């Protein structure tokens, strides 16, 4: 067994937070500490190098390394990307659209638009933000993050002569949006707290012009073209309030108009189509209704009701096409699509599996008679289907391949229901081999925050666990929106405790049903899901053999008390304002870092990104330090800090595979006894 680190870093200052010194970014002492932790992780992994390499090769062997993406039509062109064996990143291309309007690639007219591999040659990290072609298709606008801190450099490239021009906007977010004059771009820049706060009008040959500011620290700004391509829309949104401004895409210097002035608690979003602005709003019910509005007469008093809020199902999203509206509802933990074709009866899209992920995917033009659906389940890799809007007929356009032996019928997918302490029914999605029986290792994933739904997804890598006799499950706990808006509201603010107790009940009931036992139960979560993991191992450390916490939000008390940190103030609507005594007591009561105790904790694998602006690297580092000095046992405790990455981890696909292989090596090793 690899040796543990020496005695954890001693207290360097008085007060309640003995490891605050780890927040001193870029100091030699902090860099040395993080490197020592990485060295310790390397030393622990060294005896298991053969297993780690075997897992990496298994995962890589299931991926089609050289592949062609599904082309997207735009006027006279098809746009697509290719991946090639050995290349970390895709390359982006276009070719002339065939006369028969098919998706067949014409290699004789193929044009390379962007090669991320070439751009990454001198970078440790590279992330593509926006990739946007001008309406006349003569220009490509794109944004690149080369640190992982979500600050982007903006570029425009001529698709006529291949000249590339940087756009001079400092502190830019990745968001880019073309006006219809083919020379004006709208972009967002960040304020000092890394909040998207300022809207700019950009032209290659002019200085940037600031168009709009969002002064409220609770609100984030974004800009987009309407589906009809008639309007530029600017969205200001907080966790519970929305506001949309707009201007004609043909008049980029026109003044912005407001669709409806913000009112605290009124969430709405908007797109534009044949009926005017199509608006999803909770003004008459928390599950959201659908409205329309003539752009010539904005204002909420002029909105007309299309579909009232359904008390049983939440309207999550709306896709606007010329010939139909596609409404995405959340029903019993799953996504349902209702299609409202122009001049025909509405219908519901049918799907085959008990637990799945489904949404409308971009790739078709506004006037197309079809849309693309992305569908996947725990045992079926993602496939893109064309849905004929008039007939409802579905055609599979592309299925993500799994190389090597693979049969989806070799795995059984179930939708289980756990019962919460207050009687609520919590959905659990589970996959196991069809021949599985008895108790065994089980990987339980959870998130439960921000109203994000963790719909079941397929994983090439996960097959390495399943084929070794593991089960995988997702606990759809409150705080997410799998069961609708109410499910989200019941897992935030004063109800945050439901998130943690729901997860524990899911774990307990999987044990009661004979799927696993505490000696073989692994739990995992990332970001706000890392908060979940940190809390439940404080509450019930004996229930779990091991835990994985990726970029975990475990220092929630100190972070929420530091408004100078990026994004903190905007989080008040999710967690509460700690300046209020009852909120302070609540957060302190569940914050993982403050509640570490002298307990026998499960084995832990923790990750951090040094350039992460969402969850600072020190949250994981401080938590691990406190665990080392406080816990009563010596189970493996590993911290891996990616020194050239941000919140999303490594940017290259092979490095991402190696990271998964390292995590799985840890889990297979600690659960082998």
Image (tube, grey):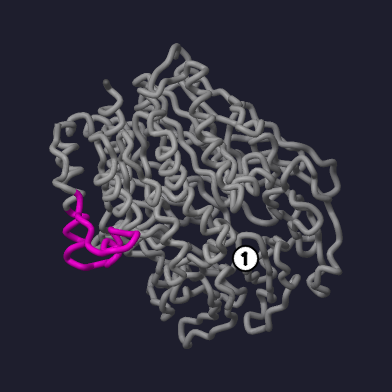
Q: Which residues are magenta?
A: 8-35
From the viewer's perspective, is residue 290 above or below residue 51? below
Secondary structure found at label 1: strand
Q: Residue at x 45, y 70 (%)?
A: 194
Tell me if mark 1 has few (under 14), some (14-19) or many (20+) residues whose alpha carbon lies within 10 angstroms of its own.
many
Residue placed under numbered mark 1 in the picture: 237
Counting from the top left corner in percent of width and height, residue 389 is at 73, 43
Q: Nearer the viewer, residue 131 or 78?
A: 131
Counting from the top left corner in percent of width and height, residue 118 is at 29, 60
Q: Nearer the viewer, residue 23 or 81?
A: 23
Left or right: residue 601 versus residue 478 is left
Does the magenta portion include 23? yes
From the viewer's perspective, is residue 587 above or below residue 339? below
Q: Residue at x 64, y 36 (%)?
A: 334
Left or right: residue 258 versus residue 291 is left
Q: Where is the C terminus found, in terms of image quarters?
A: top left
The answer to which quarter of the image holds residue 239 is: bottom right
Count of numbered marks: 1
Q: Residue at x 26, y 59 (%)?
A: 124
Does the magenta portion include 19? yes
Q: Nearer the viewer, residue 620 or 258?
A: 620
Q: Where is the N terminus found, in terms of image quarters?
A: top left
Counting from the top left corner in percent of width and height, residue 406 is at 41, 23
Q: Is residue 118 visible?
A: no
Counting from the top left corner in percent of width and height, residue 500 is at 52, 40
Q: Is residue 292 visible?
A: yes
Left or right: residue 352 versus residue 660 is right
């Amino acid at each position: 067994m690899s040796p543990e680190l020496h005695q954890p870093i001693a207290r360097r200052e008085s007060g309640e937070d003995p490891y605050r010194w780890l927040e001193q970014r870029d100091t030699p002492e902090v860099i040395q500490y993080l490197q020592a932790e990485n060295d310790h992780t390397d030393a622990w992994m060294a005896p298991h190098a053969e297993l780690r390499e075997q897992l990496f090769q298994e995962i890589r062997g299931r991926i089609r390394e050289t592949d062609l993406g599904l082309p997207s039509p735009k006027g006279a062109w098809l746009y697509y990307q290719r991946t090639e064996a050995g290349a970390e990143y895709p390359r982006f291309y276009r070719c002339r659209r065939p006369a028969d309007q098919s998706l067949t690639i014409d290699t004789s007219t193929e044009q390379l638009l962007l090669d991320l591999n070439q751009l990454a040659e001198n970078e440790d990290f590279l992330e593509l933000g926006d990739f946007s072609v001008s309406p006349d298709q003569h220009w490509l606008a794109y944004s690149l993050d080369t640190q992982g801190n979500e600050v982007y450099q903006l570029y425009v490239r001529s698709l006529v002569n291949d000249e590339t021009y940087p756009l001079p906007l400092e502190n830019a977010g990745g968001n880019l949006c073309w006006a219809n004059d083919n020379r004006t771009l709208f972009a967002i820049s960040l304020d000092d707290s890394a909040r998207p706060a300022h809207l700019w009008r950009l032209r290659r040959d002019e200085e940037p012009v600031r168009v709009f500011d969002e002064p409220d620290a609770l609100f984030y700004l974004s800009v987009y073209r309407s589906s009809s391509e008639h309007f530029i829309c600017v969205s200001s949104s907080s966790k519970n309030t929305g506001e949309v401004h707009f201007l004609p895409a043909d008049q980029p210097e026109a003044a912005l108009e407001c669709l409806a002035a913000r009112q605290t608690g009124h969430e709405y979003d908007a797109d534009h189509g044949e009926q005017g602005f199509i608006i999803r709003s909770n003004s008459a019910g928390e599950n959201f209704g659908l409205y329309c509005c003539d752009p010539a007469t904005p204002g909420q008093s002029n909105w007309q009701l299309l579909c009232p809020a359904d008390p049983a199902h939440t309207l999550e999203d709306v896709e606007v096409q010329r010939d139909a509206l596609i409404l995405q509802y959340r029903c019993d933990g799953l996504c349902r699509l209702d299609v409202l074709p122009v001049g025909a009866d509405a219908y519901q899209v049918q799907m085959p599996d008990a637990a799945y992920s489904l949404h409308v995917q971009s790739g078709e033009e506004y006037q197309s008679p079809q849309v693309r659906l992305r569908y996947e389940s725990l045992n079926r890799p993602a496939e893109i289907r064309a849905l004929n809007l008039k007939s409802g007929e579905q055609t599979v356009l592309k299925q993500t391949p799994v190389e090597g032996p693979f049969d989806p019928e070799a795995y059984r997918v179930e939708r289980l229901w756990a019962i919460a302490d207050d009687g609520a029914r919590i959905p659990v999605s589970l996959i196991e081999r069809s021949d599985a029986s008895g108790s065994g290792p089980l990987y339980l994933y959870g998130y439960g925050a921000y109203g994000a739904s963790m719909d079941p997804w397929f994983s090439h890598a996960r097959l390495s666990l399943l084929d070794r006799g593991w089960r995988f499950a997702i606990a759809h706990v409150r705080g997410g929106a799998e069961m609708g808006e109410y499910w989200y509201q019941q897992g935030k603010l004063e109800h945050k405790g439901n998130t943690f107790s729901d997860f524990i009940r899911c774990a307990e009931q999987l044990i009661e049903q004979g799927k696993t036992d505490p000696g073989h139960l692994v739990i995992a979560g990332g970001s706000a899901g890392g908060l979940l993991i940190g809390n439940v191992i404080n509450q019930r450390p004996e229930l779990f053999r091991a835990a994985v916490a990726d970029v975990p939000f475990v220092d929630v008390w100190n972070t929420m008390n530091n408004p100078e940190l990026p994004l903190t103030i905007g989080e008040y609507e999710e967690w509460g304002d700690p300046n209020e005594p009852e909120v302070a007591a609540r957060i302190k009561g569940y914050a993982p870092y403050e509640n570490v105790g002298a307990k026998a904790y499960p084995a832990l694998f923790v990750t951090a990104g040094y350039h992460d602006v969402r969850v600072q690297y020190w949250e994981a580092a401080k938590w691990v330090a406190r665990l080392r000095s406080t816990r009563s046992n010596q189970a493996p405790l590993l911290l891996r800090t990616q020194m050239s990455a941000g919140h999303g981890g490594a940017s290259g696909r092979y490095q991402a595979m190696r990271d998964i292989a390292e995590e799985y090596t840890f889990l297979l090793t600690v659960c082998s006894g």
